[in-house]
Each structure stands twice: as structure tokens, then as C-alpha cells.
Amino acid sequence: MSEERSLNFLEEIVEEDIRNGKNGGRVLTRFPPEPNGYLHIGHAKSICLNFGLALKYNGQTNLRFDDTNPAKEEVEYVDSIKTDVKWLGFEWANELYASDYFDRIYNFAVTLIKKGLAYVDDSSPEEISAQKGTPTEPGTPNAYRSRTIEENLLLFEEMKAGKYPDGAKVLRAKIDLASPNMHLRDPLMYRIKHTHHHRTGNDWCIYPMYDFAHGESDAIEEITHSICTLEFIPHRPLYEWFIEQLELFPSKQYEFARLNMTYTVMSKRKLLQLVEEGHVEDWDDPRMPTISGLRRRGYTPHSIREFCERIGVAKRENMIDVSLLEFCIREDLNKTAWRRMAVLDPIKLVLTDYPADKTEIMFGENNPEVEGGDGGREFPFSNELWIEREDFMEEPPKKFFRLGVGLMVRLKNAYIVKCESFVKDANGNVTEIHCTHIANSKSGGDTSGINVKGTIHWVSVPHAKTAEVRLYDRLFQVEDPSNEDGDFKDYLNPNSLHVIKTAYIEPELAKAELGVGYQFMRKGYFTLDKHSTADKLVFNRTVTLKDGWVKK
Ligand code: ATP
Ligand code: MG
């Protein structure tokens, strides 16, 4: 956004730190995705925030894969995450993996054991949970808590060496079983998991827990501002406790409100369900809130960054209306999309007074928003045209400024025509509209003096190319499907995809390129789908020209 805006609370913190010479004025943030799914628009918010802060204050941002949970992580996800971050327009300083720190994190654990601040516990998860107490009652120590340092060192070593099966033992921090903060009641640091890891293979059968890996990774990288979402507020004392006890670089954690958006779900687990159960085509289905889905739908990186900027940085959870995202892409595409004509629900218009063997070349702008024009484009005109069925009415009401017997309309970038009659088939469906044209009304040299209120788009029948066109609606029928009774999937919108098998498009559109936005005049913004081929063009509607949902 060009307008000046006041600083958000994170910018205020960073500026204060710079003023105080903290970390020598250095700013280093990180974006720490767990590679267990594709990134969604919520992650885009976090990416824009982390990279944006660094860019603003001459800092840098690391891309760190938080890959401490081996069962769920896949290389495909790592690749997609890198593609998406780059596509959004950001460059990371270093590509890092928490798994690269497994040796160091293990040594940190040994250090804490040696300080008497960690112990090996043989209890089951249920026992541990029961012994932890409740927010109003303190926990009770078990016998394992008083194991000697030597015993703990040996057992932890054996855990690492693979002597015990999954779940047989855990390593816990020895903090305070009576702490009002449940996260400080001897939290788990390591668990046994005999699982192959996508980077470290079978080197490890013990893996650090999030709380013990995240802050330590931040500290190893000397991250200055570690930004996460609000649910980590109660984890902050633990984040700080580990760093203090280990005397590591004092990275600091700051929390902001996660992005929630209407008519969708924003959790990788739920998005994975939609993919696996076939409710959508894949992670990049154009209805998905994933970055890859939005890209395939025709969203631009600029529009997503603009959206993230406009919603700002909040300290309290809220729900952002998806129409704001749609507003941002409309605004962007209005400036950049190439105007083209396409007829989605065709009916034939015949000009009875125009020579059947004649073709005229008409001219139109590519984008009227481009100052000084942009060269424009040409397209053929003939006596048979496809127009939208909805632009004709057998019995037009008073203020219908399109076609009906006796009514006149301008054909975009061509002539004014007058409807004389129409043809019906045996079932009573209108099949053809017959018109005459005003010969001296051609756009650019109109001397007819006739003023008409309506302009409609068209495509010449003998010259038209065909395409499949996919129209999308909200993926869910309710604003917050995660907050309804029952399963969130019960609220899927059964009409979220409408496929038009054969639309007629102007010849120029056959040259459409992937990643380019086109405005189908009066019909919305469209982009070529990744499955489109020269033989079968497929377009996705990115968004309608106006917000149609307000009325519904
Ligand atoms: P999900 O719940 O969708 O699986 P996650 O938080 O588990 O998301 P991570 O890969 O751990 O996903 O997230 C990487 C970063 O993105 C974290 O810093 C996380 O806080 C941030 N993030 C995730 N979801 C959102 C969101 N909806 N809004 C803002 N930031 C988010
Ligand atoms: Mg996570």
C-alpha cells in the first residue's frame, strides 16, 4: 500500500530494539514451516510478516524447516514450500532444517541432565498426564524424577542407541510440577520413535519435542525476533527457560493473531483430509486456500501481499472476510488483466443485413487502465455471432437495456444492432436472434447519432475458438465450518465448482499463457489452468467482476 500507515506492534518492538542497540541493531527473523502439508493463506500472512519485517529493517530471514516430527514429513512438501515462498516474492538468507541440529540439540539435553535439570521417565503418557495435576491442583512427582544424574545420562544414551521401543521412556525437563503454567510441569523434551526421517534417515530413534527444538534452533541461528501465533504464549516461559539454562543466544518470542478467513478451513490436517478424501482435486485445487491453489486460481503474489498488508497484525484472534482477499485480486487484475471477449452461455445472433461472406477486423484495447494505450488487439466480426443467452429476453421488462424485439444494443467495439425477431425450436427454446445493424455506427467512427444504453460482448461464430471454463464458488457454505456441529466436511458447498464444457472465446485467447490474468468482459477475471493444452483450453475464473455475494 502506498498510503502511510502507523507501525504495527512488532515494528514498534523492532524499532525500540534497534534504538537500544540490541543485538547490534541486527534483525534476523525466520519462517519455520513444518513440512507436513502445503502452505495456505495463513502461512502467507506469517511469511509476509517475517520477511517484511526483515526487509524493512535491513535484516534477513531464514527459511527453517521444522522437521522434528519424522512420520509426517515429506520431500514433496519441502519443495512446494520453497516454490510458494519464492513465488510470493521473498528470498531467504539460508535454507535450514531443524534436523541439521539434532546432534547439538541432543548435546543440549545432555547438558541439562548434567545440571540436574532433566530426567528419564518410564511412565506411560496416561500416567504422566495424570501426575501433572490440573490447573488448580499441583502435580505429583514420581520415583523417576529423583533418578541420579549418572543414571539419567546412561538411560538417555541407551534411548539414543535404540535399546528401547517407542514410548518406553521419555526425557523430561525438571522444572516445577506445581507451576500455574502447565507447560512448565516437567515438559517432555525427547520421545522414542523408530521412524525413518526424510533427511537423517535411520540415524535417530529419539526426536526432540517442538518446545525443545524450536527455541534451541532459533538460538543456534541467533534469530533476534522469533514470531509465532498466539497459542504459543503459554509456551514462552519454557522457550525462555531452556535458553537461559543452556546459556544460549537470547532469541525472543513474540506472538500475533493467526489469520482466520471465512468460508474455508485453515489447518493442514483438514486440508489434507479434503485432498485424501477426494473432496477437491489436490492441494492446488483452485478452491483451496493454499498458496498453490490461489496461484492456480489466478491470484497474483502482489494481491496476496496486499491482502496481508491490509489485514495488519493483530494481537487478538479475528475472522477476516474472504471478500477482502477478492477485493485485492480484483484491484490488481483491473490494472493488469487483458480484456478479452468470451461467451459462456451462448446463443446465436444472426445479422440478416450483413453479407454472409464478409469478415471485418475490429479493434479493442487490451486494458483501458493502461495510460496512453497499449497497442490493443484485433478480432474478426461476421454476420453470425455468439452472444450470452442472458442478453436477450423474449419479453423484456422496462429497464432491460439489452436485446428483445425492437431493442437496440451496441456490440462491444463493433456496431449498434437492432433486434428484429427470434427463432424457437419445437420445445419452445429460443435458438437464434435475428438483428439488423446500423452501418454507420461502427465503434471509433460512429456517425449514426444513435445513443444506446447497453453494450454486450460477442464472438464471431466462424472464427470462435472453444474452451472449457471452470467457475468457482465458496468451498464451504458457512462462514466458519470448523466451528459448527459435527464434521467440518458436512458444510462443503456441493456447488463450489461449475464446469462449462464449451465456451466460445475470441481467437486471441487461444494464445493465452499460464500465469497471465484475462478479463472476460462482463464475466470476471480468468486465467489458464495448468491442465490446459493447445487442443483443449481450460480457464479458471479467478473472481467475478463485482462481489456477487453481498446480494445472496
Ligand atoms: P496448521 O495449523 O495449518 O497445520 P501450523 O501452525 O501447524 O499450521 P506450521 O508449518 O507449523 O503450520 O507453521 C509455520 C508458521 O506459519 C508458524 O510460524 C505458524 O505460526 C505460522 N502460521 C500457521 N498458520 C497460520 C495462520 N493461520 N496465520 C498466521 N500464521 C500462521
Ligand atoms: Mg505447527
Image (cartoon, rainbow, N blue to C red):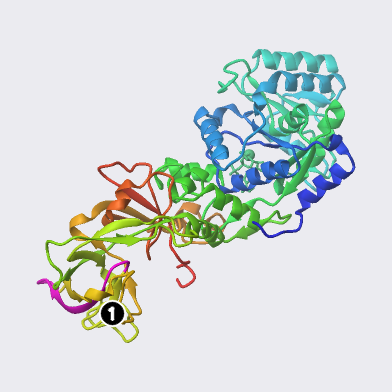
Instruction: Give the vertical position of 523 relative to 177 (above or below).
Output: below
Residue lying furthest left:
426
Q: Is ligand 1 closer than 8 angstroms to the Cβ of mark 1?
A: no
The residue tagged 1 is 448
Graded by Cα atoms within 10 Å as few (under 14), some (14 to 19) or many (20 or more), the crowding at tag 1 reads few
Say which residue appears at 58% left-offset and 27% top-offset: 70
Amino acid type, callout 1: Ser
Q: In this view, does 342 lie to the left or right of 137?
A: left
Quadrant that contains the N terminus? bottom right
Q: Looking at the image, which residue sits at the far bottom? A: 398
Quarter of the image that includes the C terminus: bottom left
Q: In this view, does 129 lie above or below 453?
A: above
Considering only vertical position in the picture, is 365 above or below 393?
above
Q: Which of 367 and 38 is in front in this view?
A: 367
Residue 441, position as x, y percentages in the image: 27, 75
Q: Is residue 310 magenta?
A: no
Specify the segment rendered in magenta.
Answer: 412-427
